[in-house]
Image (cartoon, grey):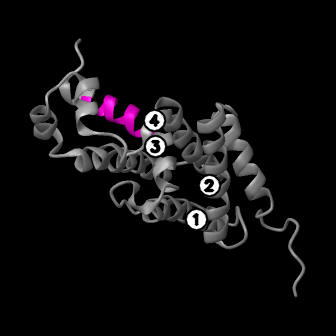
Amino acid sequence: MAESARDRIRAAALDLFTQKGYAATATREICQRARVTKPVLYYHFGNKEQLYRSLVVDACQGALQELKRIAAGSGSVRKRLVDLLAADFAHTRRDPELAALYFRMMFSARKEGPHIDYVAMGKHWADLLTRVVREGVRKGELEGSPRQIAWALLGTHVIYTMSFVLRGRPALDRALARSIVNLICSGCARGRGRAPKR
């Protein structure tokens, strides 16, 4: 089946934005790479900024919906935390260029591209993890601040994801997700290694 013009535009833009950045990528280049005319790009996306937003925001919102479904699932809190990290790792493995673009734009100068509130997007992810961890604290599976545990999980997850995007390793798989959850949550399990009171 032939790739649609819309899909070709998205693929070309993702490749160029990842390689060159948003500001350095001309609409003309995207059209040439996608083998479409500017009116076709404008028909599907309106302009370069809307194309960029479509790539980043739509992908993140789609992933977040899947993660919400997993968070609401059954099983122990640790299992769901592993499932959440493993699912996000799977997104990165499927589309490493999108992850690279996300990191590139998150750390670029403010004028490099359209404003997207990456902090708010990360906060949605942290809020999701916090809800699952809060359930673990309520059930006695974990002990500690749900917010701090969630941010520790998210921070460790992001470091491994950046390493994969930049270096191609480590393998972003379920074993790594389980290792991260065990590392963070072992120090938060009820009755284990409480920090001394000050």
Residue in front for this viewpoint, 66 or 139: 66
In this picture, which residue range is highlighted in magenta?
9-18
- Label 3 environment density (alpha carbons within 10 Å; few <14, some 14–19, many ≥20): many
Q: Please identify, in this view, whether the residue under mark 2 or under mark 3 is nearer the observer.
A: 3
Which mark is on residue 135?
1
Q: Say above or below: 158 vs 4.
A: below
Q: Which residue is mark 3?
A: 101
Q: Which residue is mark 4?
A: 19
Amino acid marked by disc 1 = Glu
Q: Are marks 4 and 2 in contact (CB under 8 Å)?
A: no
In whole angstroms, how far apart are the C-alphas of marks 3 and 1? 33 Å
Amino acid marked by disc 4 = Gln
Residue 93 percent location from the top left of the image? 53, 31
- Label 2 environment density (alpha carbons within 10 Å; few <14, some 14–19, many ≥20): many
Q: Earlier in the sequence, mark 2 or mark 1?
A: 2
Q: Say above or below: 32 vs 91.
A: above
